[in-house]
Amino acid sequence: MNNYIPVILGMALVTYLPRFLPLKFLREIKLSKRAKLFLQYIPYTSLSILSVRGILTTDIQMMPGAIAGISMAGLIAYWKNNLVLSVFLGIITSFIVISYF
């Protein structure tokens, strides 16, 4: 059991450092308006990439639930501009459609 402690600590360090170091050393840098706009779209882009990949690789029986979930997530993201709410409601919509239809 003690053999896993160094592995867990090493994994924690390796995943923490790439997130901490840019925040620590690049905090003082002022970004241009265009760069800020670009960075604001990254969460929505990654959400759509994961969603489209999920639809393309889903089983045919789950296709209606996947399409309903991505549609709900897209609409909520467009209307409310809230990434967490859109993902949550997309998951709930997929669950309801898969379970009851």
Image (tube, rainbow, N blue to C red):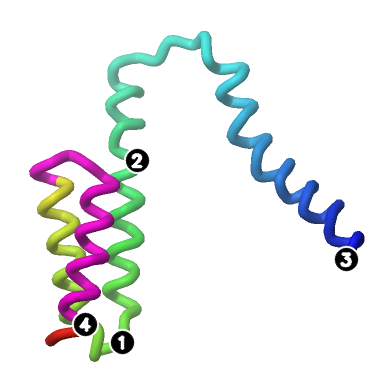
Determine which residue is flagged by label 1: 59
Give the magenta range: 78-98
Separation of disc 3 and disc 1 at Cα? 39 Å
Disc assigned to residue 45? none
Q: Secondary structure at mark 3?
A: loop
Determine which residue is flagged by label 4: 98
Name the residue type under label 4.
Answer: Ile
Give the residue at x 35% y 23%. 35
**Of discs 1 and 4, which sits in the foreground?**
4
Mark 4 neighbour class, 10 Å CA radius: few under 14, some 14 to 19, many 20 or more: some
Give the residue at x 84% y 54%. 5
Determine which residue is flagged by label 3: 1
**Of discs 3 and 4, which sits in the foreground?**
3
Q: Are marks 3 and 4 in contact (CB under 8 Å)?
A: no
Disc with the residue nearer the chain's start (2 vs 1): 2
Separation of disc 3 and disc 2 at Cα? 40 Å
Disc with the residue nearer the chain's start (2 vs 4): 2
Q: Secondary structure at mark 4?
A: helix
Mark 3 neighbour class, 10 Å CA radius: few under 14, some 14 to 19, many 20 or more: few
